[in-house]
Amino acid sequence: MWLVMFFLVISVFTCAAKAGLGANISDPCPSVCKCTPEAIIRCNRAGLSALPAEIAASTVSLNLSNNYLRILSPNAFGNLTSLHSLWLDGNSLSFLAPGTFLALGQLRELHLSGNSRLTSLHPNAFRGLRNLASLDLSHCRIFEIHPLLFSHLPSLERLDLASNNMRYVPRAFGNLSSLATLSLEGNHIEALGRDSLRDLEALYELNLRRNRIWIIQTGAFAKLLRLGVLNLGHNHIADLPNRLFDGLIQLKTLHLEANRLTGVGCAFRQLPNLRSLYLNNNQLSSISPSAFARLTKLRFLHLNKNNLSSLPARLLAQLPGLKHVFLAHNPWQCGCDLLWVSRRAASSGGTVEGLPCALRPGASAACPPPPELGPEDECGAADAGGTPGPHARPGRLLPAVVACLAWGLARSDASPAAF
Ligand SMILES: *[C@@H]1O[C@H](CO)[C@@H](O)[C@H](O)[C@H]1NC(C)=O
Ligand SMILES: *[C@@H]1O[C@H](CO)[C@@H](O)[C@H](O)[C@H]1NC(C)=O
Ligand SMILES: *[C@@H]1O[C@H](CO)[C@@H](O)[C@H](O)[C@H]1NC(C)=O
Ligand SMILES: *[C@@H]1O[C@H](CO)[C@@H](O)[C@H](O)[C@H]1NC(C)=O
Ligand SMILES: *[C@@H]1O[C@H](CO)[C@@H](O)[C@H](O)[C@H]1NC(C)=O
């Protein structure tokens, strides 16, 4: 009993000592919050329905996440000119008054995710945030973004708009000349127009996973000369026109898994830096013999879970960087072509996984040596930009027309009059 008391007294003393040593006695700490000497104030999960009074003007980091805040008074953060990071995620904010953050010229990161009543934002909501580098607006219910909303954020590098209700790519990226990472994952986007992404010249990572994209206009990626990672997985893409990925000269990783692709033609010709290509979980049943011929840096190729029964003998020849090819869960029909494919992959140091026939004993004895590789290139015409390659579909005009229609529709029922 005495021992317990003793430890209690000791720990109370250590606490008091810590608080006294570091914190500035003249800086008040709101009673429901925890304040540290480094000017970090944590008021998260404190049941707050209004901002606590008396937050020290020297505060550098303020955590208000997971409370019940519904509105912020216009001058709520008027004194916090030293603030570097502000957490307002997991509240019930439905509106951000223009100029709410006007005084926060030093703010670097702003977290607003999980405010599920936030459906649209005033074009001046973010005025004053001239040093903001990271903005998280994910998991709200945003369906419309005003073209000028982000125009006050010249330093923005990271923008998260995942899991909202957007039906088209917002036309609001005009001034984001530093933006390196953009997520639009988990929205309801159906189309990428030629100009949807044209201003994002510094972009390195673009995440469009889990949307409903089925139309991409050729040229959509033409300005993304620095893009390293493009995620188009889990969409409704059925067709890859030949020049679709033009411009992506730095692209290293391309996700196209879980779409509705049935064939691969000559779309992957202009990707000289591609290392990982995800084509798994589609319905691929044919691949052009020259589909991957120019991907000299390709290391990982994912073709598992498709409808492939064979592969062209020359498909994986002359890919010196190849490390792993994933082929499991396809209805393979073992033949010499498949054996040659896996031998050629192996001769450049690559490992083929999930191809049952190549491992069958005696398989090689039944097949003649692979044929010499001729100079033929089924995609040559496609590269020249002239006649379409063998797998290109007719009627390229139709999707473009439909895209325009979808665009108009999306814009007309999302009324900008709300602003
Ligand atoms: C403590 O607060 C006073 C008055 O606001 C200020 O002059 C002083 O620099 C502060 N000291 C620290 C360590 O923050
Ligand atoms: C703020 O609080 C949330 C939990 O409510 C936590 O996940 C987050 O890491 C905190 N941020 C900081 C900087 O402490
Ligand atoms: C801001 O600081 C001034 C004095 O420096 C004070 O009168 C005012 O109440 C403060 N405002 C807030 C919102 O804390
Ligand atoms: C973009 O920034 C420039 C100056 O940096 C400014 O003149 C221009 O008005 C801004 N554009 C928008 C759409 O805000
Ligand atoms: C799988 O490919 C075969 C031709 O190889 C085709 O007849 C069949 O319809 C395809 N199945 C699916 C589900 O695409």
Image: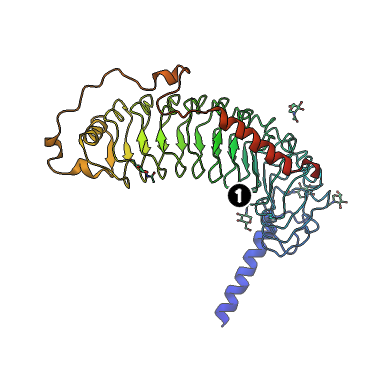
Residue 128 image-quadrant placement: top right
Q: Which residue corresponds to the image point at 34% horizontal and 20% vertical from the top-left?
A: 377
What count of labels does the image hold?
1
Displayed-image quarter of ligand 4: top right
Q: Residues within 10 Å of mark 1 (few under 14, many from 20)?
A: many
Q: Can the viewer see residue 415 in this picture?
A: yes
Can you say which quadrant of the picture contains the N terminus?
A: bottom right
In the rendering, at what x and y percent does residue 380 appear?
A: 39, 19
| Residue 419 is at least partly visible in this image | no
Report the side of 259 relative to 115 (left or right): left
Spot occupied by residue 371 in the image (x, y as percentages of width and height):
20, 24
Name the kind of residue labelled 1 in the image. Ser
Image side of residue 387 versus residue 412, left or right: left
Q: Which residue is mark 1?
A: 163
Where is residue 55, by image quadrant? Answer: bottom right
Q: Quadrant of residue 341?
A: top left
Q: Height in image: 86 above or below 336? A: below
